[in-house]
């Protein structure tokens, strides 16, 4: 949820930046996979609460770094905090309709978005 403040950064900008990050195993962006649980915007500081598809994901640190890099490209972002959480546990029901369609396309050999 966005906190009121002087920032002109919008949730839409943050989610658009995060949609550029594609899960390397599933070929779908992390937003449509349902991995982003919360976005906090306070001035230029962005807080992300997210999960991964599995606890033992070897890409844990890479995801945190990728989120940080992607969000720092948004004009006005001065700081990024990424909190990886395991509750609620991720499950395929969290995938958006767009994500499910992308998974179906990947399964047919089509390019991931």
Image (cartoon, rainbow, N blue to C red):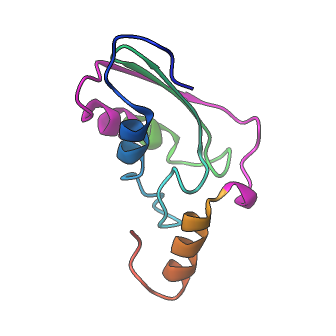
Is 97 within the magenta?
no
Left or right, 3 with respect to 54, comes to left
Front-lying residue, 55 or 19:
19
Left or right? Give the position of 75 relative to 15. Answer: left
- Left or right: residue 101 versus residue 10 is right
Q: Is residue 50 above or below residue 83?
A: below
Residue sitting farthest toward the bottom: 108
Q: At 61% from the left edge and 59% from the top edge, which residue is drawn?
A: 96
Q: Position of residue 61 (x, y in %)?
A: 46, 37
Question: Which corner quadrant holds the C terminus?
Answer: bottom left
Q: Which residues are magenta?
A: 66-94
Identity of the residue drawn at 40% across and 51% down: 21
Residue 94 picture location, percent across and down: 69, 54
The quadrant holding residue 97 is: bottom right
Residue name at image x 76 percent, y 35 percent: 87
Q: 39 above or below 22?
A: above
**In the picture shown, does residue 106 fall above or below 53?**
below
């Amino acid at each position: 949820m966005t906190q009121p403040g002087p920032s002109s950064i919008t949730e839409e900008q943050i989610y658009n930046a995060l949609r550029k990050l594609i899960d390397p195993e599933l070929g779908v962006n992390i937003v449509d996979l349902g991995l982003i649980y919360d976005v906090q915007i306070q001035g230029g500081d962005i807080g992300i609460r997210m999960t991964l598809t599995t606890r033992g994901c070897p890409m844990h640190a890479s995801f945190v770094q990728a989120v940080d890099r992607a969000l720092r490209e948004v004009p006005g972002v001065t700081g990024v905090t990424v909190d990886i959480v395991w509750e609620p546990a991720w499950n395929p029901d969290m995938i958006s309709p767009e994500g499910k369609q992308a998974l179906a396309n990947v399964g047919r050999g089509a390019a991931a978005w």
